[in-house]
Image (cartoon, grey):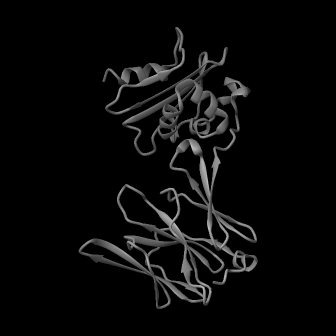
Amino acid sequence: MPVCPYALCLSVLVTCAAAAFAQDVTTPSGDIRFDWSETTDGPVTRVFVGETEIAFDPPPAIAWLEARAGTLALIGISQGGNGCSASFVWLHTAPGDLRRTAPFGTCSELVTLSHDVETVTVTMPSRRVADGEVAFVYDGRSIETRTLGLPPAEVGPEAGADALAGVYLFDLTGTEDWRLPLTALMGAANYATLQRLSGQGSPMEVEDDWVVGEGCAPGNCGATASVIAVHRGDGRLLAGFWESGQPPRIWGEPGPTPPRAIAALRERGAQ
């Protein structure tokens, strides 16, 4: 089976908007076509290159062109629902080499692409937030999965509390430098929950003896809350979170003058 010469195959990398399942795209083997229909078992999208159907088992409910890399096309597929929003396949469209890979991904739709002369890489968030990002590296024959971990923090714990003013909460929870002290404080499982509940928020602010940041789960701020505070004198670390229907949880030693956000988090349990 021929393999695409990647020095040529990856010379052009064009990212495209997702959710384009009705869009025809020209390739050397014919147009990529997405034919959507409603069946007794639910919606189905059939994928064609020219007159050749690309088989999926089961057929996806939705399919779309995510990106192109020379004669490669990155196709997104989904069965709908909340279980897994997206998987991906690489589709070869060179004449005489019409084939696809097995599906891959972490169920995230947030993908970025990069390439060199021999491989093309799709990077996306891991399903385990503590793992950071995952890269799927394809060389035309097989896909290698690499866990990349969390990125370094722009402002680490060694910089001191005052340096954190203006930093967003998710810039702490989503970095390797802060993973270690937060995990030591609250444990790995609670740290993962704190990450999940800190994706949206405002910059950290100085409040008397503390620098404090508040956050929440994106799109669900009415039913979630998270807090991180660092003492300006001794560097003490506080962390806590709350989800609707559960009592608030707080770690660390707030002392006699806790931040207002920690007090507000405690009050959630009385509501």
In the picture as drawn, the residue positioned furthest to the left comes out as 40
Quadrant of the image occupied by residue 178: top right
Q: Position of residue 128 (x, y in %)?
A: 52, 45
Quadrant containing the C terminus in the rendered view = top left
In the picture as drawn, the residue positioned furthest to the top comes out as 256
Rendered residue at 35%/59% (across/down): 81
In the picture as drawn, the residue positioned furthest to the front comes out as 1
Quadrant of the image occupied by residue 47: bottom left
Please state which of residues 137 and 179 is positioned toward the viewer in this rendering. 137
Quadrant containing the N terminus in the rendered view = bottom right
Please state which of residues 149 and 178 is positioned toward the viewer in this rendering. 149
Q: Position of residue 198 (x, y in %)?
A: 51, 38
Query: In the displayed structure, would residue 245 be above or below residue 28?
Result: above
Rendered residue at 42%/45% (across/down): 219
Rendered residue at 53%/63% (across/down): 104
Q: Position of residue 139 (x, y in %)?
A: 67, 70
Q: Position of residue 129 (x, y in %)?
A: 54, 44
Rendered residue at 59%/26% (across/down): 184
Query: In the displayed structure, would residue 254 be above or below residue 20?
Result: above
- Exactly how many numbered labels are in the figure? 0
Query: In the displayed structure, would residue 169 be above or below residue 56?
Result: above
